[in-house]
Image (cartoon, rainbow, N blue to C red):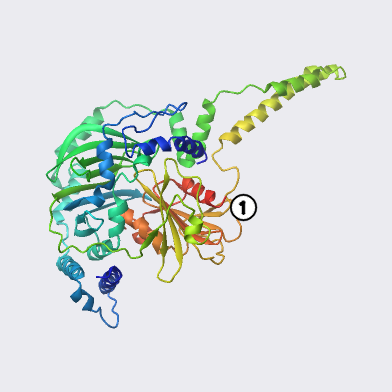
Amino acid sequence: MDAAACNAYRADWLELALDARAGRTRPGDLSAAHADACDACAAWTARRTDHVAALASLTPVSAPAELDEAVAAALVPGAGGRANPFGERLRHRLAALPRHQAPSVLDRLVAEELADPAAARARRFAGDLDRPAVPGALERRLRRVVDAPDAPASLRGRLWPVLSAVAATAAAAIILLAIRPDRETPRPFQVHYGRPPVSSPLATGLADGWTGGILAAGGEAVVEGPR
Amino acid sequence: MRGGLQTRIMLGACIALATAACSGDVVVESKPGDGFEKVGSDPLLPLLELSVDAPWTTTYQGTRRVEARYVAGGVETELAYRETVSADGTGNFAVETVDVLSFLSDPTTFLVTQDLREGFFYRYRDFAVRDLGAFYLAHVAIDLGTDVQIAGRTCQEILVQSEFPGQPSFQVALDVETGLVLRSIETDGYGVEVQRMEFETFDPAPDLSGVAWFQPAIPEIALDLSGDLDAQVGFQVLSPSLLPDGYQPWKAATITEPGGREWVKQTYTDGVEPLFFFHSDAVQPVVPAGPSGSTAGTSAPLGDNLYVYAIGPVTVIEGHLRGHEVIALGKTDSDSMLDLLESAID
C-alpha cells in the first residue's frame, strides 16, 4: 500500500477524532475505502477505535471524602481525630535536633544569588583571583616620567602614589571586563525572551515530543527567559 | 559559550581517534594538557556498539511504561503512560500509547495526539547511543557491575555521565543479547529524576502481522554531510560552526512542506541527545520586534528577530535570520543555542 495514502488516511482519522472530542463537526465523513483495501490501516483503525471507546466509556472517579480527612490528619496533628504516627515521630526527632543560627553572610549571599545569579557568581570568583602585578612596561614608563631631570621635585613625591592608584584601577577594570557575565558585543540579531506572537507548529510539535505535551498545555508551565 | 570553542577544538583534534571506536578496540586516546583521559580499551564498547543499531536491526515487541516529571515555572507536572512498541528489524517500527496512568483532564485527546508523536518517540525521546564517536567524546560510561532482569531479559546496567557540567545523566539497562535499552532513568543536572522508561513485557519473536507501521508525515531526503550541502540543496545552507559543548554534526536532510516550501534540517548530537536546526529557503517578510518578552541588546539588521523560550528541559528558538525562517531545539542552554545560530551567519 502507498505509504502516503496510509499517512493521509491516518492523519484524517486523527483529525476527525480530535474534532469530535472538541465538539466540532465537519461536513462529509472519512472515506472507508482506503481502510477496506489496506490491512495495516484497518488494524490501526480498529485498535484506535477500541482505545478511544474504552477511555471515553470510563466514568471519572472522585477521590473519597475520607482522603481529604486523612491528608488533613497527616498534615496537622490531631486534625480529623487521627494522628499520623510516622509524622509524629519525625516531628519529635526534628524538634530534638540542636538549632544552629545561620551566619548573616549566608543570608546575604543567598539573597544576592537569588536576585542575580550570574553577577553573584562573577563577584565570588573575582574575589578568588590572584591580584596581577602592574605590567613591567607600565612601571618603566611611569618611572621614566617621574625620574625625568625636568620633572619637578615635588612630583616625584606626590605623583607616584596617584599614578600607582590609576594603574591599579586600570588593571582592576580590565579584570572586571574580562569576567563580566554580560556579553561585550551585542548579538547580530534581536533576541526576545518569550514566545513569538505565532509559534511554529513544527517547533512546538518537536518540543511536545520530548515532554509528552504536558508542559505546553495552557502555557502555564512554560519557562521564559534565559536559562 | 565562547569557552566552548576551545573545548570543541580540542575535541575535534581527537575525533579521528574517536571514530576508530566505531570499529575497533581503541576508544579515545588521552589529550595532552587538559587532564582529560579515557582508557584505551573500554569493556563496555561491544555492548554499546551493538546498542547503536539495535532499534533498527532487532525484531521485537513489548510494552513499556514511560514516566516524566518536570518542574517549570514553579509548577510540578507528572505524566505516566504505557505504550506498545514493535519493530521488524528492517527499519519499520510502531509505538502506540495504550494506557494513561496519570491523571489527565482529557486522556482521550492525549491518546490520539500521542499518535502524531510516534516517530519522535521511537527515534529521539529515550536514551540511546546515537553516535558512538560523539558519545565517547562527550560522556563517560561506567559499568555498574550489576545484571538485572527486566521483562524477563538479562540486562547490564551502566551509568552514563556527561563530560560537561549541567547536562543530564542516565542509568540504563542494556539487553546483553540485543543491545536494546530496556530501561533508562534520566536525571537532570541537579540529580533530580526527570524521565523513566522501562519495558514490562518483551517478546523477541512476536507476531507482527497486524502492526500498523509508522509512516512519516513529511518524508525527509537525506543529505551527504561530507559533501557540499549548498550544491545538494540548491540554495545557500546556513551551517553553524560553533556547537554547544560536546555536540557534533550528525545528520542533514531536506523536508518539503505540502505547500512546496523547502526546509533544511540539520541534526547534531552529543552521542545521546539530538539537537535540531531547521531553516527555510524562502525569503521571509520583515517581522517587527514584538513585545512578547524581555529583549537583549543587538546590532541586528531589521527583521532578524529570534524568540527564545523553554518547554521543560528543551530550549526552543524560532524566528527569522537573514531572510530565512529558523527553528532550533535542543536540551541545552539558550546561550549555546544562540551561539550556534550566530555562527551560522558569520
In terms of image quadrants, where is residue B132?
A: top left
Which quarter of the rendered picture does the N terminus of chain A lie within?
Answer: bottom left
Q: Chain of mark 1?
A: B
Relative side of B108 to A143, left or right: left
- SS at badge 1: loop
Would you say B122 lies left or right of B209 here?
right
Q: Is residue B254 left or right of residue A127?
A: left
Q: Residue at x 50, y 45 (%)?
A: B242
* Total number of numbered discs in the rendering: 1
- Above or below A202: residue A92: above
Q: Position of residue B280 (x, y in %)?
A: 48, 62
Q: Please tell me whether residue A152 is drawn above or below residue B131 in the rendered image.
A: above
B137 or A134: which is nearer to us?
A: B137
Q: Which residue is mark 1?
A: B299
Residue positioned 46% across, 50% down in the render: A225
Residue nearest the observer in this picture, B113 or B124: B124
Q: Is residue B9 above or below residue B53?
A: above
- Could you tell me residue B106's position as x and y percent? 24, 64
The correct choice, above or below, for B255 with respect to B184 in the image is: below
| Neighbours of disc 1 within 10 Å: few (<14), some (14-19), many (20+) | few
In the image, A148 versus B184, the foreground residue is B184
**Residue B28 appearing in the image:** yes
Residue A212 image position (x, y, % from top left):
30, 56
Residue A223 horizontal/vertical position (percent): 41, 52
Which residue lies most toward the bottom here?
A27
Amino acid under label 1?
Answer: Ser
Q: Is residue B315 visible?
A: no
